[in-house]
Image (tube, rainbow, N blue to C red):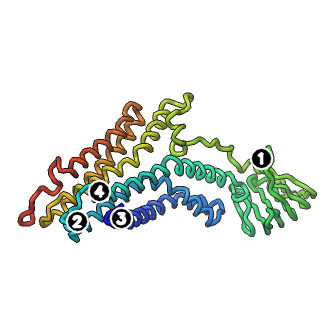
Amino acid sequence: MSRLSSYLLRQLIGPVVLFTFLIVCVVWLTQSLRLLDLVINRGQSAGTFLYLTVLILPNLLIIILPFSFFAGALYIMSRLSSDSELVVMSAAGVSRVQLAVPVFVAAGAVMALTYLCGLYLMPVCQRELKDKVVGIRADIGATLFSEGAFNTPVKGLTVYIREIDMNGGMRGILVHDSRNPKNQISYLATDGTLAQTPEGPRLIMHDGTVEQTAGGGARLSILRFDRYVFDLDQFVGATPVVERASNEQFLGALLNPDPGLKPRTRRAYLAEAHNRITQPLYCLPFALIAMAAMMRSRRARGAHALRMTAAWLAAALLRIAGYGAQGLAAGNSALCALFYIIPLAGTLAALAAFTGHVPRLSSLRWRGGTP
């Protein structure tokens, strides 16, 4: 690449990275809040929360990266135009095609990163996220047992563990079951462990007593035990069947869905597959829209705001049309062609504007503050 192209590419990378970072932070914060309640209620650590929120990022980047590239490209083209750098480059004999080279190089890099997120990182991270969430919800130990605290997993049941060592061993166990007010039972044990058996989770207690009341508390019976197994199945729901959503499937599974799936699910899979293939392609019309708005313009009063507004409207309408196609294709697989027609039509229209085959975006003259 020439020094001029390298200069433009360096100027473009900074805003794209900045816009991506800012938008990701805002969206990531809103998306991560739904995991906060799960992590807190299940007694998970801050590291687990951060790990779960990081797994969300590829799903966000697929949507954010093309928009960040457009915002960065439009900003740089606008600044170069305002500082008259584009005029100087044009006067020095640099053609619009030469100026477009670094923009398309940046667009190609963003497209490659978007494809990486959509075709590999997103399904991998979404699978790991779902498996991790299912594991947290099924972690009966984190739900029932926390050191030095009275836990009430269900109304009428209280569990207290005085100490939990590094190996998961428990000291000073109290389990009080008052769900039946006429027949309350208390289990006290010196130590115990949590075991996962083929029949389900069990709390194995050693060297303790079972104290049971009857007759509304009129009678008390005490039974000593060396080893007692407390069934925890009653506090654990049925083992969930992990069904893979469309955003957890790889491209091959989406393009060739299982024939046994419902027709609606198969259509949704196909729509998701074509959406992943075409989402990065919007970087091409976005690049052309930004360049057409700033390179083919008049330096008239008020024209800059008009060009910026027109560029943003064109990009927004183009992307909204793409999102609309996804909904239509989910209902009728024959409409999957729209995924390719929309970005292609947008690219051709923006290319025509960039090469001068359609009127300039700033063809309106401003006089007296009104068009």
Tell me the mark number nearer the camera, choosing from 1 and 4: 4
Amino acid type at image mark 3: Ser
Which is more N-terminal, label 2 or label 4? 2
Label 4 to label 2: alpha-carbon separation: 12 Å
- Whether label 3 touches label 2, CB < 8 Å: no
Q: Please give left or right for residue 59 compared with residue 136 in the image.
A: left
Label 2 to label 1: alpha-carbon separation: 73 Å
Label 3 to label 4: alpha-carbon separation: 12 Å
Can residue 295 be seen here?
yes
Amino acid type at image mark 4: Ala
For label 2, the residue is: 89
Which is more N-terminal, label 4 or label 3? 3
Tell me the mark number nearer the camera, choosing from 2 and 1: 2
Element class at badge 4: helix
Residue in the image at 59% along x and 48% along y: 127
For label 4, the residue is: 100
